[in-house]
Image (tube, rainbow, N blue to C red):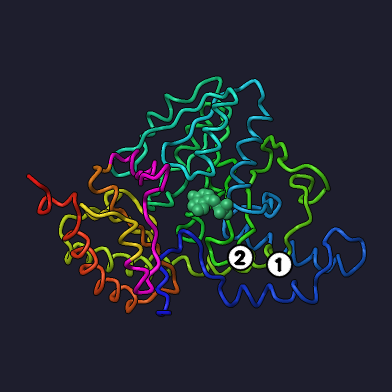
């Protein structure tokens, strides 16, 4: 097998060596249950609380405001259901048309359960209109949930301003920061955000660990009921190795924030400029909006994203596409549809998402092989004007 060139970090990340090392002890020797009364359990509990402080450090909040969950999806669901259960008389949710399925599909489901959902539109760059947000919030609104950064395009939303607008109207504000955390600074103490979700496996911690931040004083109703773990806010024996790993990963992420902007940002820009210079008829999605430094969503006209990915994969290059295979047809994702990316471009969308572990050589390798792949696919594409019957 070729050497893997991994440009799919918005899907998941490698566990960093320091994180693995920190976790090892908790998979072998320190395996006690943090709820146990004996000193073996107590020792684990101390480490768990230290990890909570490390996560709080990354998010700029208090350790007591951190609830450990199993993943970003659980954190998102917990936030939405908490608001709906805390304010049962309110039956309206405001969110966006570009959320991750963890929020988007949950809202679609809740609509079937009798809730009303407003999906705020975005413009062709993936940007939100805050005046529309203000208009959408009413006395019936239980919660506003807006992602901090989009997983497909990397477009960053003005969530701090959005939280202020929600608060002005007396409504709770949640943000899905699964893609934002570790890539851009987050300071919850200086914001009006009430709840925020993150996920370990997007920031070089393992899969199966997430966090929901809940601002002190926020009315909160648990999602999982049972034991008294997490201060009675999330039942279930803690994933101690995962929590330790996420703590370490948070500490590293905080130290690497500057590198994320400068180093990862420059790699992404090199890839973007290189593609624009080498391949005609392409479109960078969200290029005029504020974006995460690591994400590049690029649409190649007249070809299919899946075909590009398969050919890239032959060279060991891992990326993602912007369409979902549903009922045999390749539909562009709801995000690209919401941005009204023209049909001939949307189908050929590929997402490259980088990390601090990528190198300039890897970027240059993609720039070397991708133009040939696109040419080959365009030569045989029935959509390509050169090949059409007209
Ligand atoms: N929210 C966003 C923006 C994501 O990108 C993802 C994962 O891709 C999730 C939520 C879900 O996170 P998890 O895989 O931890 O459930």
* Tag 1 residue: 241
Q: Secondary structure at mark 1?
A: helix
Residue 115: give x, y in percent of width and height.
57, 24
Q: Is residue 243 above or below residue 347?
A: below
Residue 238: give x, y in percent of width and height.
75, 58
Residue 308: give x, y in percent of width and height.
30, 61
* Tag 2 residue: 206
**In the rendered image, is residue 178 in sight?**
no
Is tag 2's residue or tag 1's residue first in the polypeptide sequence?
A: 2
Q: Which residues are magenta?
A: 311-340
Residue 339 lies in the magenta stretch:
yes
Alpha-carbon neighbours of circle 2 within 10 Å: few (<14), some, or many (≥20)? Answer: many
Q: Is residue 123 left or right of residue 157?
A: left
Residue 188 lies in the magenta stretch:
no
**Where's the C terminus, which quadrant?**
top left
Q: Is residue 126 above or below residue 355?
A: above
Front position in the image: 282 or 149: 282
Q: Are marks 2 and 1 in contact (CB under 8 Å)?
A: yes
């Amino acid at each position: 097998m070729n050497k893997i060139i991994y440009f799919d970090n918005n899907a998941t990340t490698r566990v960093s060596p320091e994180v693995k090392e920190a976790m090892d002890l908790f998979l072998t020797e320190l395996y006690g249950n943090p709820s146990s009364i004996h000193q073996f359990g107590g020792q684990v509990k101390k480490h768990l609380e230290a990890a909570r402080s490390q996560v709080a450090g990354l998010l700029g909040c208090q350790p007591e405001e951190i609830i450990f969950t199993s993943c970003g999806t659980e954190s998102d669901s917990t936030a939405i259901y908490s608001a709906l259960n805390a304010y049962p008389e309110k039956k309206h949710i405001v969110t966006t048309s570009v959320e991750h399925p963890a929020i988007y599909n949950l809202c679609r489901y809740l609509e079937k359960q009798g809730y009303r959902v407003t999906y705020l539109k975005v413009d062709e760059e993936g940007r939100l209109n805050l005046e529309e947000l203000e208009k959408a919030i009413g006395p019936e609104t239980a919660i506003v949930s807006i992602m901090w950064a989009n997983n497909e395009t990397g477009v960053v939303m003005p969530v701090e301003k959005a939280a202020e607008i929600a608060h002005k109207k007396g409504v709770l504000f949640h943000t899905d920061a699964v893609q934002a955390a570790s890539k851009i600074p987050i300071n919850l103490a200086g914001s009006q955000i009430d709840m925020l979700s993150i996920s370990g496996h997007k920031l070089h911690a393992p899969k199966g660990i997430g966090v929901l931040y809940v601002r002190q004083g926020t009315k909160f109703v648990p999602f999982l009921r049972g034991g008294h773990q997490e201060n009675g806010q999330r039942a279930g024996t803690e994933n101690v190795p995962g929590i330790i790993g996420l703590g370490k990963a948070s500490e590293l992420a905080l130290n690497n924030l500057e590198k994320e902007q400068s180093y990862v940002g420059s790699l992404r820009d090199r890839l973007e400029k290189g593609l624009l210079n080498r391949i005609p008829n392409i479109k960078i999605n969200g290029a005029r909006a504020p974006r995460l430094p690591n994400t590049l969503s690029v649409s190649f006209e007249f070809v299919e994203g899946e075909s590009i990915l398969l050919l890239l994969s032959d060279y060991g290059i891992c990326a993602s596409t912007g369409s979902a295979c549903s009922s045999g047809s390749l539909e562009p994702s709801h995000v690209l549809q919401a941005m009204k990316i023209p049909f001939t471009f949307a189908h050929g969308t590929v997402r490259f998402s980088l990390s601090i572990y990528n190198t300039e050589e890897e970027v240059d390798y993609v720039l070397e092989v991708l133009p040939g792949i696109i040419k080959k696919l365009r030569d045989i594409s029935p959509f390509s004007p050169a090949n059409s019957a007209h």
